[in-house]
Image (cartoon, helix red, strand yellow):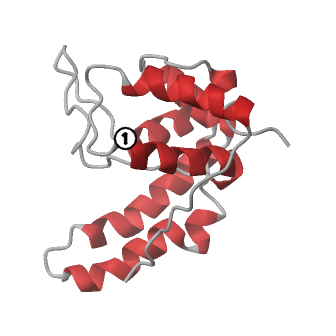
Amino acid sequence: MPTPVVFPVAMIDENSRTIAEQNFDSIFNRPHVMMRDRDTVERKLRVMVEGGKQKLMIISDFDYTLSRFEDAGGTRCWTTHGVFDNCAKQVDPELANKFERLKEKYFPIEFDPKLSQEQKIPYMEEWQTGENYGKSCHPPDVVVKTCQKADNMDKTIDEESVYSMAPQA
């Protein structure tokens, strides 16, 4: 069973707090953003801000539970993994090949109807936390920036300020 994640209360300096507050407000006040407990979400975001980009890895919504399956024109949208896969092909073909090899190995296990969930879990944990993934597939900043552009997402912050909310050392 995976170890639960504990989110300590982050302490950041007043200048960073002001920047973070402005960014949080600009995101949270959008009509399509909904959450049950804003204080909890803000506290978790502050922990991420304080940790900086070296301690942050986000892979989410791999199965369209939060995002659109199709855009307004009927074109199928990418999952989060798909954004990285497609952008890696453009920026770092070797990284794209590593993504593909890992997917070829683990994807069939994830969807094997003959395996129980308990049997699948160690493989899924290995896929996401094992040495093969952790050392070879963390996308460099250039891949992330290219993906931001390629995905045509609404920009709420510019590329250079993605990590500016974190306190500077």
Q: Please give the residue where the numbered disc 1 appears in the rendered image.
A: 38
What is the number of callouts on the image? 1
Residue shown at 66% from the left, 55% from the top:
55
Residue shown at 55% from the left, 56% from the top:
98
Quarter of the image for residue 163 reads top right
- Residue 140 seen in render: yes
Q: Amino acid at mark 1?
A: Arg
Please provide percent x and percent y for residue 5: 47, 68
Please provide percent x and percent y for residue 114: 14, 81
Question: What SS does tag 1 mark?
Answer: helix
- Residue 91 seen in render: no
The quarter of the rendered structure image containing the C terminus is: top right
The quarter of the rendered structure image containing the N terminus is: bottom left
Seen from this angle, which residue lies furthest right? Answer: 169
Q: Is residue 57 above or below residue 149?
A: below
Q: Is residue 156 above or below residue 142?
A: above
Q: Residue 110 vs residue 124: left or right?
A: left
